[in-house]
Image: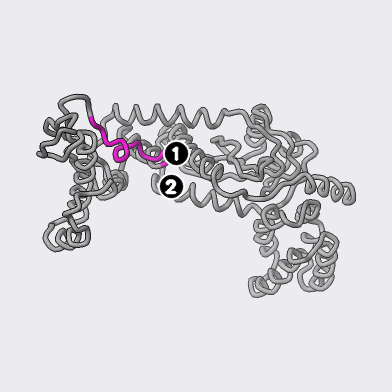
Amino acid sequence: MAAPASIDAIEWLRKQIEETAPDPLKAMLVQMVELLMSAEVDAVCGARYGERSDQRGNQRNGYRERPWDTRVGTIGLKIPKLRRGSYFPGWLLEPRRRAEKALTSVVAEAYLLGVSTRKVEDLVETLGIERLSKSQVSEMAKELDGVVKSFRERPLKGPYRYVWLDAIEVKCREEGRIVNVACLVAVGVNNDGRREVLGLEVVSTEDGAGWLAFLRSLRARGLKGVELAISDAHPGLKDAIAAVLRGASWQRCRTHFMRNLLIKVPKAAHGIVATFVRTIFAQPDAESVRLQRGRIVEQLQARFRDAMKMLAEAEELLSFTAFPKAHWRQIWSNNPQERLNREIRRRTDVVGIFPNRASIMRLVGALLCEQNDDWAVVRRYMTIEQEEVTETKTLLKKSA
């Protein structure tokens, strides 16, 4: 669909920039959208506005005002009306993306619950919304809660060979106090080699009981076929993995391990020790990885006894070697999960302090739901073929 041919787009834009004030971007957006709506209505009517034509099947009947919330603020659109039937620009006024809608509802809910500050008021303005009624927020929240609930409770159709587990803390108001709560997130790779968000739970603290209940809920929904769980070394999480994901190996995240290891090393030696340890993961096969670990422990033990003792005992750091070499880079750390966590934090930091746990679930759940949809259509995260499954079983038998 295009604007009338007589309008030269470049000249039109130049004219708007030169003549429009005080907000040329908003004015240009309004005029361009109204031109597009006019062209679409002309197509529906079968003739241009004011044109006599035997092909005309309908006529315009004035306009109706409709507020449009955009990144440049709330704009009053004039939507053409028809004498017969109705016209609505669905391509323009479609619902917002779930995550953006969730963010808007959470900020607005904080405002309506009386816990807002000047920062929250500024956030509402930043979102480009002039006003949100309580009924609008309620309807928005109701729709989002239904979507997130269905997503969190959907059956899992495994097997999921690899599962990444992690938690992030967010601030929340409870009984008049500001407390930290933990969002537990699980991501897996399905049989097609695509990532899926398996689950989300909000708990009071990241302890063994919370992880145990979370993993049991995933298993009840159909989680199966897990061969390797990747996470940091949180004691409660390790025990929960052993109790629920029986038969699965545990891979200690190499990034978290490195941070813990360097605590036992003088700051001046961090660079050299980190360089030595990274060579372990640059080896071509499982045997070479273990030999290199032994050489490093032997070379550095005299200078860094505690750190090398920790490295020598960390067998779970090398669990990835029992799996196909093509997968090592993705499964030897929690880095894929950390990237997802950064995106969650980027959204939650905008809110700062959530008004309640339901609002946390709404925003984080909507974001994870969108991420899951994106992963379903992009290229596969890894290739999982039957030959690789056979190779893994052989490697596991050898390591046993």
* Residue ID at (77%, 59%): 310
* Residue ID at (14%, 34%): 63
Q: For residue 102, which numbered disc appears in the image?
A: none
The residue furthest top is 84
Question: For this view, does 271 lie left or right of residue 315?
Answer: left
Q: Nearer the viewer, residue 362 or 327?
A: 327
User: x, y percentage for residue 364?
Assistant: 48, 40
Say if the magenta span includes residue 86.
no
Q: For residue 363, which numbered disc appears in the image?
A: 1
**Residue 122 visible in the shown view:** no
User: x, y percentage for residue 29?
Assistant: 22, 50
Quadrant of the drawing holding the N terminus: top left
Question: For this view, does 331 lie left or right of residue 44?
Answer: right
Q: Is tag 2's residue or tag 1's residue first in the polypeptide sequence? A: 2
Q: Label 2 amino acid?
A: Arg
Q: In this view, does 257 lie above or below 340?
A: below
Quarter of the rendering containing residue 164: top right
- For the residues labelled 2 and 1, say whether their Cβ atoms are less than 8 Å apart: yes
* Residue ID at (87%, 51%): 399
Type of secondary structure dominating the magenta stretch: loop
The residue furthest front is 54
Say if the magenta span includes residue 92.
yes
In 3D space, how far apart are the residues under numbered discs 2 and 1 (Cα atoms)? 8 Å
Q: Is residue 400 above or below residue 276?
A: above
Question: For this view, does 283 lie left or right of residue 219?
Answer: right
Residue marked by disc 2: 347
User: x, y percentage for residue 378?
Assistant: 55, 48
Coloration of the structure image: one colour
The boundaries of the magenta stretch are: 87-99
**Residue 224 visible in the shown view:** yes
Question: Judging from the image, what secondary structure is the residue with disc 2 in?
Answer: helix
* Residue ID at (19%, 49%): 4
